[in-house]
Amino acid sequence: MKTFKLVGLKVEQNEDNVNRVKEIVLEDGLIINKEDGENHWLIEALVSKDYATFFEELANLKSDLRIFVTISKKSNTPAQINAKIKSLTILKEHMSILLEGRLQTKKLKHNPEKLLSDLMTQGLSGDSLLQAFRQNVNEKKG
């Protein structure tokens, strides 16, 4: 297993048949690649207790969440993970969210429109959208 610093977390929500991405402000976090050959990851996010109601409602749905995680440094392109909330723990000043999920690999050669849509869903636009799209294209070529 390999452990990395979690520096960004966004959660996709479907409200009135419209997908929106909510950025979660992290106090701290880590993400673990289980290296099981199945792309399973374990994510722990330490956030403000202000998010308690939001995450409790998501946990009660008991369905997969589409999340976007940024690993190691903010300038990295977020990775998409389909995850479930495993536990919510209220601490003295914060809240710990434990998620487990599977990393979704991007197939750019087959669907650049999907990549563009995913990046836009993450809230990217303008120059940041173009930069993230170029970075993903170059990763796929290399």
Image: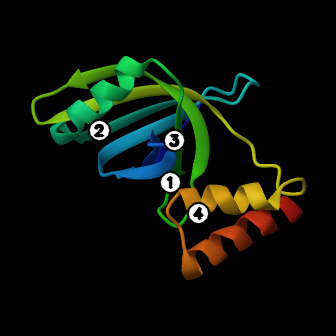
Real-space Cα separation, disc 1 to disc 3, in angstroms: 16 Å
Quarter in which the C terminus is drawn: bottom right
The label on residue 72 is 1
N-terminal of the two: label 1 or label 3?
3
Residue 2 lies in quadrant: top right
Circle 1: element type: loop
Real-space Cα separation, disc 2 to disc 4, in angstroms: 26 Å
Asked if the residue at tag 4 contacts the one at tag 2, i.e. Cβ–Cβ closer than 8 Å, the answer is no
Residue sitting farthest toward the front: 16
What residue is pinned by disc 2?
46
- Residue kind at label 1, given as amino acid type: Ser
Q: Look at the picture and state if 21 lies above or below 123.
A: above
- Residue kind at label 2, given as amino acid type: Leu
Would you say 8 lies left or right of 33 here?
left
What residue is pinned by disc 4?
120
Would you say 120 lies left or right of 51 here?
right
Circle 3: element type: strand
Is residue 142 at least partly visible in the picture?
no
Real-space Cα separation, disc 3 to disc 4, in angstroms: 14 Å
Query: What residue is shown at x 49% (from left), y 60% (from top)?
Result: 73
Residue 35 lies in quadrant: top right
Circle 2: element type: strand
Quarter in which the N terminus is drawn: top right
What residue is pinned by disc 3?
67
Residue sitting farthest toward the bottom: 127
Real-space Cα separation, disc 1 to disc 2, in angstroms: 15 Å
